[in-house]
Image: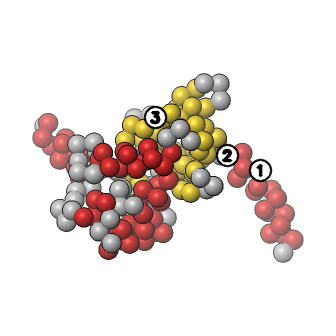
Amino acid sequence: MMKQFIFLILLLPTMVFSQTIAKVIGITDGDTITVLLEGNIQKKLRLAEVDCPESGQPFGKNAKQFTSDQVFGKQISFVETDTDRYGRTIAKVYYDKEKYLSAEIIKAGLGWWYHYFSKDRSLGDLQEEAKLEKLGLWQDKYTVSPWEYRKMQREKVN
């Protein structure tokens, strides 16, 4: 018991200090937001563990609107997890007393669990529930994942 307590005390500062507080000032699409950091520094964040429909896809605008309704103009906290090939920071974004934005998008049926880059099986469960309830993009039985859509777009060009 004492070892667990000491471990928690040692871990607590890294849990608290690894989160960054920011204000959401822009929504690029369902899974990309722009935040304003201390010192008026803007930073683009790509949401971790979720992939939303592209703007040209069905439900792309819905996903963007949902993300906007959830976080635009709000204070959020985020934890950086990686950087993508476009140089964007990949981050887990939390708002409204620790709601996890990626999970909320998946739960609403407006994004896919990005299982290539996530091991959080609970997000897969949320996706299955949204599918069963035919929420959002799951209303369309011919829905195409964003990664398949992007691949098809690249093949058109070549």
Measured as percent of width and height from the top left, residue 51 is found at: 37, 52
Q: Amino acid at mark 3?
A: Gly
Query: 10 Å neighbourhood of mark 2: few (<14), some, or many (≥20)?
Result: few
Q: Secondary structure at mark 1?
A: helix
The quarter in which the N terminus is drawn is bottom right
Q: N-terminal of the two: label 2 or label 3?
A: 2
Marks 2 and 3, how far apart in space? Answer: 23 Å
Pointer 3 residue: 26
- Judge from the rendering whether residue 32 lies leftward or rightward of residue 56; answer left or right: right
| Image-quadrant location for residue 37 | top right
Would residue 122 be found to the left or right of residue 99 on screen? left
Q: Which mark is residue 18?
A: 2
* CA–CA distance in space, label 3 to label 1: 30 Å
Residue at figure coordinates x 39%, y 37% from the top left: 28
The secondary element bearing badge 2 is classed as loop
Count the numbered circles shown.
3
Residue at left offset 27%, top offset 51%: 59
In the rendered image of this protein, does residue 78 appear above or below residue 130? Answer: above
Q: Residue at x 40, y 50 (%)?
A: 66
Give the Cα separation between the discs numbered 2 and 1.
Answer: 8 Å
- The percent coordinates of residue 44 (x first, y second) are 48, 34
Q: Which residue is mark 1?
A: 13
Residue 37 or residue 1, whichever sits in front: 37
Residue contact between numbered discs 3 and 1, judged by CB atoms under 8 Å: no
Residue lying furthest top? 40
Q: Crowding near pointer 1: few (<14 within 10 Å), some, many (20+)?
A: few
